[in-house]
Image (spheres, helix red, strand yellow):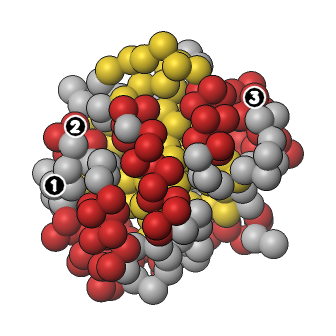
């Protein structure tokens, strides 16, 4: 199981939003590149970067920071936030991003995601499924929908998506522990999909529970920045 550190960028800074609320922001650093280098040095197998400004505007807003991260680290980088066109996805991949994460586009324009899978390959395309109480949220988590997380995963799997990042908004950045029931529900969708979980991670015990569920990876943010979890220790514990 991969332990993947998150770098959420807003206004060029490394931040965390409490339960996705843009009004509840904590700044953890002025330099996203320094954060990326730190996580690489501590053994990160890959780095998860989110352009929070882009998630709301609908187009990448922190490309300079993303490019700088790509220049300074050797581990694979996946990027989400504001990717709503094939051209944007291609541009990021050309810059050296390994995986692009479609979120809002998977709901608003599912045909686009299907085209991206066909054109870019299933290994390069990830769909971010962000849910509050089981229902998908879009536009940087600012708008709810009537779509259940499992239904979106099934639809996107039929479109050719192989990998999903599920974020439980209600636990995100709370350090309350993961929503195991939600993770288990997605794993039951089946069809050979891969699920990466995000939200609420605080301890090694949380990671052990998710490993038992069978997720491919876990994205960790606040627990690392607050010192509740040590990346090197977690990576060594779950490396296979």
- Which residue position holds label 1? 61
Q: Please tell me whether residue 101 is drawn above or below residue 209 in the rendered image.
A: below
- The answer to which image quadrant residue 37 occupies is bottom left
Mark number, residue 52: none
User: Mark 2 or mark 3, which is nearer the start of the sequence?
Assistant: 2
Mark number, residue 56: 2
Q: Residue furthest right?
A: 212
The residue under the point 27% across, 61% down is: 88
Callout 3 secondary element: helix
Callout 1 secondary element: loop
The residue carrying pointer 2 sits among few (fewer than 14), some (14 to 19) or many (20 or more) residues within 10 Å by Cα, namely some
Q: Is residue 192 left or right of residue 61?
A: right
- Which residue position holds label 3? 185
**Distance from Cα at disc 2 to Cα at disc 1:** 10 Å
149 or 196: which is nearer to us? Answer: 149
Query: Does residue 80 appear anywhere in the picture?
Result: yes
The residue under the point 76% across, 71% down is: 239
The residue under the point 44% across, 58% down is: 116
């Amino acid at each position: 199981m991969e332990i993947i550190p998150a770098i959420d960028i807003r206004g060029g800074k490394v931040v965390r939003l409490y339960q996705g609320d843009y009004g509840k922001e904590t700044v953890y650093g002025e330099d996203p590149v320094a954060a990326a280098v730190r996580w690489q040095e501590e053994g990160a197998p890959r780095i998860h970067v989110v352009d929070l400004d882009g998630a709301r505007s609908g187009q990448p807003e922190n490309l300079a920071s993303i490019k700088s991260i790509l220049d300074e680290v050797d581990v694979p980088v996946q990027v989400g936030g504001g990717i709503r066109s094939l051209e944007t996805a291609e541009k990021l991949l050309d810059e050296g991003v390994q995986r692009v994460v479609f979120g809002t586009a998977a709901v608003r324009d599912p045909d686009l995601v299907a085209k991206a899978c066909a054109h870019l390959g299933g290994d390069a395309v990830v769909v971010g499924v962000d849910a509050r109480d089981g229902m998908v949220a879009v536009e940087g988590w600012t708008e709810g929908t009537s779509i259940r997380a499992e239904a979106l995963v099934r639809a996107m799997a039929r479109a050719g998506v192989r990998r999903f990042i599920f974020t439980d908004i209600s636990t995100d950045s709370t350090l309350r522990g993961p929503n195991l029931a939600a993770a288990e529900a997605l794993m039951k969708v089946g069809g050979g999909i891969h699920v990466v979980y995000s939200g609420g991670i605080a301890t090694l015990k949380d990671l052990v529970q998710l490993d038992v569920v069978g997720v491919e990876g876990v994205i960790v943010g606040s627990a690392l920045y607050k010192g509740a979890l040590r990346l090197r220790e977690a990576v060594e514990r779950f490396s296979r």
